[in-house]
Amino acid sequence: TQLLEQSPQFLSIQEGENLTVYCNSSSVFSSLQWYRQEPGEGPVLLVTVVTGGEVKKLKRLTFQFGDARKDSSLHITAAQPGDTGLYLCAGARGGATNKLIFGTGTLLAVQP
Amino acid sequence: DTAVSQTPKYLVTQMGNDKSIKCEQNLGHDTMYWYKQDSKKFLKIMFSYNNKELIINETVPNRFSPKSPDKAHLNLHINSLELGDSAVYFCASDLAGGRETQYFGPGTRLLVL
């Protein structure tokens, strides 16, 4: 079973703080995605990284794919209450089935 | 416009009953999925259909039977419901081919009593 471990599992911070969420695996993935899920909703894609070492920025969010394509990180600068949610990484092996292996999740709460 | 819709949103039922969940996507995608999210928020794929053909079938009890009448619909029928089936079930869709974005529905919250 390919397992994607996320850390930390839970994170409660004050508005304005910075944070980093990690997603680690022993398996290589062709691409890695990050999703955010809000209560009562389905996951929504934030970004896809496909090249080892790739860094993508989405406003205050910075995503990095490890050189070996086994791990990834999500860094949020100056967190806001609207960033609150469950963050999920998901690795894909590619191909026709596009089967995603989801990470264990990081529940983030940003207090105003 | 709703991209991926599921019905019902909530489902409360007794152990042993049979129930169905429906999913429809209006994105023109040819691949649809069913995921189960447990109480610890772990999201795991159950099934995937591409153009009405089953292409992913994870280790799921055979009480669960997906059916795809056309590529815009993927339903999930569950026989003899058990307490452990309580979870949130998500439908998703995408264009087959690897790096495409999967779009998720709002989820169906199933509670088996």
Image: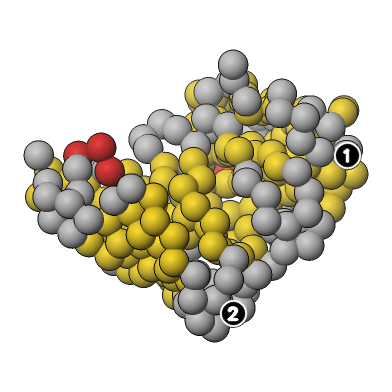
Q: In x, y percent, where is residue B16?
A: 64, 34
Q: Which residue is painted at 78% across and 49% down in the image?
A: B96
Residue A27: assigned label = 2
Q: In x, y percent, where is residue B53?
A: 90, 44
Q: Which residue is painted at 59% across and 16% down in the image?
A: B1
Q: Is any part of residue B32 visible from this angle?
A: yes
Q: Which residue is painted at 72% across and 34% down in the image?
A: B76
Q: In the image, is B79 to the left or to the right of A103?
A: right
At numbered mark 2, what does the secondary structure look like: helix, strand or loop?
loop
**Chain letter behind tag 1:** B
Q: Which residue is painted at 63% across and 28% down in the image?
A: B4
**Chain letter behind tag 2:** A
Same chain check for tags 2 and 1: no
Give the class, few, some or many, for how many residues have Cα within 10 Å of label 1's Cα (few <14, many ≥20): some
How far apart marks 2 and 1 lie (CA) works out to: 29 Å
- B91 versus A56 height, above or below: above
- Quadrant of the drawing holding the N terminus of chain A: bottom right
Q: In x, y percent, where is residue B21?
A: 67, 28
Residue B85: assigned label = none
At numbered mark 1, what does the secondary structure look like: helix, strand or loop?
loop
- Three-letter amino acid code at the position of disc 2: Ser
Label 1 belongs to which residue?
A: B51
- Quadrant of the drawing holding the C terminus of chain A: top left
- Three-letter amino acid code at the position of disc 1: Asn
Give whichever of A19, B54 is nearer the camera.
A19
